[in-house]
Amino acid sequence: MKSFKFSAVNNPAEAITLINKNTDAAFLGGGTNLLDLMKEHVALPNEIIDIGNLSLKEIKATASGISLGALAKNTATANHPLIRKNFPMLSKAILAGASAQIRNMATNGGNLLQRTRCSYFYDIATPCNKRNPGSGCAALEGFNRMHAIFGWTRECVAVYPSDMSIALSALNANVKVLSSERERIIPFQDFHILPGAHPEKDNSLQHGELITAIELPKNDFAEHSAYIKIRDRNSYAFALVSVAAGLTLNGNTIQAASIAMGGVAHKPWRALNAEAYLKDKAATAANFAKAAEAEMALAQPLAHNKFKIEMGKKALINALETAFKGNI
């Protein structure tokens, strides 16, 4: 591991002031991803700013929904009564990720900022545009079974790993961010970005900005939502395909559907075609299948992940059927 300067701060203003002085500095929350990247010489910050003591850990009800402190632990979030009651999809998604030990350390804000688990990204002996822009993408012609089928470019075919963020996307969350100049709210769909010509950028956060909270607006999904995760083994594995789905129902009619997919793109993939198809349709097996077909028709698989198309269809149908049956 490369040597680095270590500083601890006690308030957000101090943290932002420090990081603005050094473009090679990084914030440390739980450290469950950053420290791994540093050990593998993938991330090379020369200064670490420990924000663990900041008072950004509260989970609370607000007039518009629920606010999740950026430094609240994943375990505390998943098991919080407000989340289990009002946003069970989020609780299930968090508990589907990583291990209990990691969830006990990982923070909500840090979860959003996870880097890809692409093996070529972690292997500094191979070309990777995300790690070293302009060097090429080894996964494009390499073994790409785990990689993207939506939104990829020739510069990057990596997928985003978070389970929590897939649920947050379906829940239309907002990310509250603080800088030295302002506080801003980023809609979750705009927070993570597709690779485009700049695969080194995972999100729209600017250097010097600090995530302070994630805000969940009220919705009608509590009784009709689901999180489905398909992986190579039943625990401690990243998704091949995952689906978060919430339904607003009027009897047997779907007034609105909110669906996001994981394991398929560089960001949480919002299944907009499936959502559009389901609006004002009856909640039937046939309509769930047609919605899945409409979404997966957009897929552009790579050499080794064509199976994700059929898997994606079945995962979408499973999530929609589970959401319709309900959590009561």
Image (cartoon, rainbow, N blue to C red):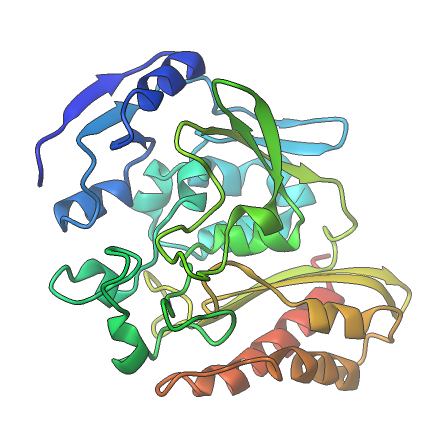
Q: Quadrant of residue 263?
A: bottom left
User: In the image, what residue occupies the spot 41% across and 55% down?
Assistant: 97
Q: Is residue 178 above or below residue 257?
A: above
Looking at the image, residue 206 sits to the left or right of residue 191; the answer is left
Q: Quadrant of residue 119?
A: bottom left
User: In the image, what residue occupies the spot 40% across and 44% down?
Assistant: 113
The answer to whether residue 52 is seen in the rendering is no
Looking at the image, residue 255 sits to the left or right of residue 275; the answer is right
User: In the image, what residue occupies the spot 42% across and 59% down?
Assistant: 160
What is the x, y in percent for residue 49? Answer: 28, 24
**Location of the C terminus (image quadrant):** bottom right
What is the x, y in percent for residue 321? Answer: 70, 73
Please state the total of marks drawn on the protein image. Answer: 0
The answer to whether residue 217 is seen in the rendering is yes
Q: Quadrant of residue 112?
A: top left
**Location of the N terminus (image quadrant):** top left
Q: Nearer the viewer, residue 75 or 44?
A: 44
User: In the image, what residue occupies the spot 52% across and 19% down?
Assistant: 181
What is the x, y in percent for residue 281? Answer: 87, 74
Q: Is residue 45 above or below residue 222?
A: above
What is the x, y in percent for residue 159? Answer: 41, 64
Looking at the image, residue 249 sits to the left or right of residue 54; the answer is right
Q: Nearer the viewer, residue 65 or 145?
A: 145
